Structures are given as C-alpha cells and as structure tokens.
C-alpha cells in the first residue's frame, strides 16, 4: 500500500506525463524524457481505484470474520470499515470533480 493518500497523489499529478492522447505530442506539453519514470494520470488513477477496492475487500473480510466468530476484534473491524468508507468517499469526490471538469470542457465554444 502506498504511503501517500489519494489526495496527495492527485496533487502531485499537476503536470501529468502521457494520458489519453497516447504518444501524440500536445502543444505546450512537457518533454516526455523529463518524467518518463512517472506513471500517467490514467495509470495512477487505476492504481488508486484498485487500492480503494482492496480496502473494501478487507472491510468485507473483517466483517465476515467478526460475524462468523473467527475474530472478536470489533475495533479493527470498525477501523477497516472507516478506512474503506473514507477512501470510497474521496474516490467519489475525485470522480465528481473529473466529471465537472469534463462537462466544463464540453461546454467550451471553439
């Protein structure tokens, strides 16, 4: 699991390399050789979605363990649930902001 939260990762991507345009150069884009070791925004977003999914799976497993009696640690279960809930809410906020930005771009007149 990554040591930085999703919000910090998204802030660090203010100057993404790559993206949906593939290998085509974009006017005003930075030279790819400078940030070749950094993942593209899409790859980074995919990793974060997978991390949120793994937290959801951990929370589900923790609930199953508590209900079936394999674990009696309700505190760990509640912490796992809160981690999953907060990470999912953050992911949905990022999604909503991305959708708002997309809508804004689509409303632009050329």
Image: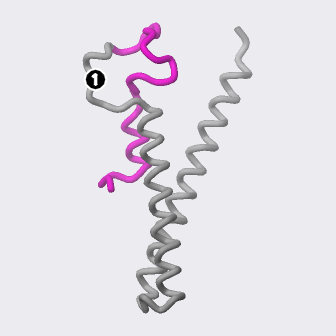
List the residue tagged with mark 1: 36
Q: Position of residue 82 (x, y in %)?
A: 50, 71
Q: Position of residue 63 (x, y in %)?
A: 52, 80
Q: Is residue 1 above or below residue 14?
A: below
Looking at the rendering, in which quadrant would you find the C terminus? top right
Is 45 a magenta residue?
A: no
Indicate how the structure is coloured in the image: one colour
Looking at the rendering, in which quadrant would you find the N terminus? bottom left
Q: Is residue 11 above or below residue 82?
A: above
Q: Is residue 5 above or below residue 11?
A: below
Residue drawn 42% across and 88% down? 71
Instruction: Tell me which secondary structure the magenta stretch mostly adopts.
Output: loop
Q: Position of residue 39 (x, y in %)?
A: 35, 32
Mark 1 Cα within 10 Å, few/some/many (few <14, many 20+)? few
Residue drawn 45% across and 69% down? 58
Secondary structure beneath label 1:
loop
Q: Nearer the viewer, residue 83 or 61?
A: 61
Q: Quadrant of residue 25?
A: top left
Is 27 a magenta residue?
A: yes
Q: Is residue 52 above or below residue 71?
A: above
Q: How many marks?
A: 1
Q: Which residues are magenta?
A: 1-30
Residue drawn 74% across and 22% down? 107
Residue drawn 46% across and 24% down? 19
Side (left or right) of 57 relative to 101: left
Q: Position of residue 67 (x, y in %)?
A: 54, 88
Q: Nearer the viewer, residue 3 or 77?
A: 77
Q: Nearer the viewer, residue 39 or 98?
A: 39
Q: Nearer the viewer, residue 29 or 25?
A: 25
């Amino acid at each position: 699991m990554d040591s930085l939260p999703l919000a910090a990762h998204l802030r660090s991507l203010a100057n993404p390399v790559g993206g949906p345009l593939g290998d085509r150069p974009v006017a005003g884009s930075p030279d790819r050789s400078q940030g070749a070791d950094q993942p593209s925004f899409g790859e980074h977003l995919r990793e974060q979605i997978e991390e949120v999914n793994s937290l959801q799976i951990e929370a589900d497993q923790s609930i199953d363990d508590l209900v079936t009696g394999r674990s009696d640690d309700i505190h760990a279960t509640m912490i796992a649930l809160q981690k999953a809930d907060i990470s999912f809410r953050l992911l949905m906020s990022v999604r909503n902001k991305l959708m708002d930005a997309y809508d804004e771009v689509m409303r632009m007149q050329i």
